[in-house]
Amino acid sequence: MLQRKRRSEIGTHRTAQGSANGKRREVEVEGGVAVSPVPLTLGERVTVKYDGLLAQAGARDIYLHRGYGLSHSWNSVSDLPMKRSNGAWEVEFVADDESRLNFCFKDHAGNWDNNRGRNWSLEIHTGEIP
């Protein structure tokens, strides 16, 4: 019998296997966050969906606070406004740096969801085969 995984489990795949290159269309990571496509590749469009703490608290506006690089030293930091779509907040952008993508969320009132101080972080691949 199949067991349904809890939503907070890291790496829970929400949709079926993607294209022949092995990518998943959307992967749910902890804290009410889903990212697609995974793995992330430099130059590709990335979608981040969020229905975590701020969304559940009824935030009027939510922003993806993102940057690239080491977890303690973000570069190219920006805040991207998210839009409500199908019960979650969503934003799209191009992965335009070949280092790590780091992100968290903030609302219009200055409240943050930073995954209990850990933020979210995903490696970006260049698409080259070593």
Image (cartoon, rainbow, N blue to C red):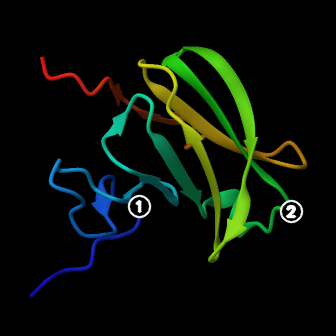
- Residue under numbered circle 1: 8
Q: Residue furthest right?
A: 109
Q: Position of residue 82 (x, y in %)?
A: 72, 53
- Residue under numbered circle 2: 60
Q: Position of residue 35 (x, y in %)?
A: 45, 51
Q: Nearer the viewer, residue 129 or 67?
A: 129
Q: Quadrant of residue 2?
A: bottom left
Query: Is residue 42 positioned above or below 59 on the image?
Result: above
Relative to residue 39, is residue 116 drawn left or right? right
Q: Nearer the viewer, residue 58 or 20?
A: 20
Q: Quadrant of the N terminus?
A: bottom left
Q: How many marks?
A: 2
Q: In front: mark 2 or mark 1?
A: 2
Residue occupying image coordinates x 81% and y 62%: 59
Asked if residue 113 shows in the view, the reply is no
Q: What amino acid is labelled 1 in the image?
A: Ser
| Other-residue count near label 1 (Cα within 10 Å), few / some / many at <14 / 14–19 / ≥20 | few
| Other-residue count near label 2 (Cα within 10 Å), few / some / many at <14 / 14–19 / ≥20 | few
Residue occupying image coordinates x 29% and y 63%: 13
Q: Position of residue 90 (x, y in %)?
A: 63, 58
Relative to residue 13, is residue 98 drawn left or right? right
Q: Position of residue 105 (x, y in %)?
A: 68, 44
Earlier sequence position, callout 2 versus callout 1: 1
Query: Is residue 129 positioned above or below 82 on the image?
Result: above
